[in-house]
Image: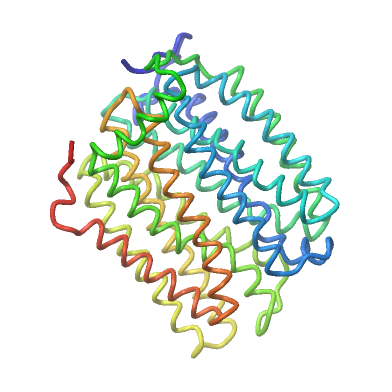
Amino acid sequence: MTSIPTMHMPAAAPTTGLPARLLLLLASGAAFSVATLYYSQPMLGVLGADIGAAERTVGFVPTLTQLGYALGILLLAPLGDRYDRRTIIAFKAAALCAALLAAGAAPGIGLLLAASLAIGLAATMAQDIVPAAATLAPEAGRGRAVGTVMTGLLLGILLSRVVSGVVAERFGWRTMFVVAALSIALIGLACWRGLPRFAPTTQLGYGALMGSLAGLWRRHGALRRATLAQALLSVGFSAFWSTLAVMLHGAPFHLGSAAAGAFGLAGAAGALAAPIAGRVADKRGPELVTRLGAGLVILAFAAMALMPVLSTPAQLALLAASAIAFDLGVQATLIAHQTLVYGIDPGARSRLNAVMFTGVFIGMATGSALGALALAQWGWMGVTGLATAAAVGALVVRMWPGANAVVR
């Protein structure tokens, strides 16, 4: 049984099968909610100095946020198969507002770390929005609909760094958290008023619902491979973005938080290709997209090994070009993996999504932690080496014999 919207749906857009205003609402909701995970990254330099926290300790702010997100996906996202997703989104929006305000008011690193974990837990409203798009869209346009909503989500990830870098530099890092809370309050209200209701696809209790995750993992080899490959790509993605501001703050660049955040504009160019990846997945099959995407990520990260022999302006140009390329590869692969996973069992989309994104954000948190250690021990070349190796691992998973088979 699939989720059925219980309100009237206006005329659908021909490319996705969804009304344009509903698609815009879903994309915006995904963007604003997931952006809260990344506002802190360009602000780490000024934030740590302001509250008197050591560089290594401040690095746990994005790590805990991403761990909270992974935990929230695992423990909360499966509820989308059991309860009305619209109600879940509204509750999470309220909790996210409270966590953001707590972060903005934090007097020291202890409360900030606790608030960061809570932000991650509540920001999983994005992972209720994406399966909603997959449920509302017809099968023939599912890849394009998911790709469009994921463009919003991915732009939220990347442009959040631009916004927070500028706001933190001009108005202070606390202001950024307050502005973020206001944005979530507005988007939560819009989702409550604009989203249809969804009928549950299962009557399982919470314990049985959680227990079914292990069964899905065991039965579906496609789910295991998608999760592992995307998690490996996420290691490199997170290692780059979580250490970029610290690297640019030092020699030879000496750039502030606004400049670090501006690199999100480069990554945003790659995010705009997500709907294209969805169309290719619909027409040519998602497996091709996963392999091409992983290969592009490898090339983009490996290219940064040339930085030590380049001038400072050339290094910045290479960083921007690599950011465009690897973001395009990571995001195209993610769209293809979602298309694969959502097609496994329509009645378990929230749980399938929960399994895959738990792995993705464990990869994100691992990338943040390993990236910080690599930067401290081996410098920027250590970060790029880590990211390249992780991307190679992802391509190996996708190229492994029998990768198209589904184990049931």
Taking depth in this image into account, of 249 and 70 the one nearest to the observer is 70
Taking depth in this image into account, of 73 and 7 the one nearest to the observer is 73
Q: Is residue 347 left or right of residue 42?
A: left
Residue 249, x across and y down, in percent: 69, 74
Residue 250, x across and y down, in percent: 68, 79
Residue 372, x across and y down, in percent: 58, 69
Which quadrant is the C terminus positioned in? top left
Which quadrant is the N terminus positioned in? top left
Q: Residue at x 26, y 32 (%)?
A: 344
Residue 132 position (above or below residue 49)? above
Q: Residue at x 27, y 51 (%)?
A: 289
Taking depth in this image into account, of 112 and 308 the one nearest to the observer is 112
Residue 271 position (above or below residue 142)? below
Q: Quadrant of residue 3?
A: top left
Q: How is the image coloured?
A: rainbow
Q: Is residue 31 left or right of residue 74?
A: right
Q: Is residue 255 left or right of residue 345?
A: right
Q: Residue at x 70, y 74 (%)?
A: 255
Q: Residue at x 38, y 24 (%)?
A: 135
Residue 234 position (above or below residue 49)? above
Q: How many marks?
A: 0
Q: Quadrant of residue 28?
A: top right
Taking depth in this image into account, of 36 and 136 the one nearest to the observer is 36
Residue 111, x across and y down, in percent: 77, 48
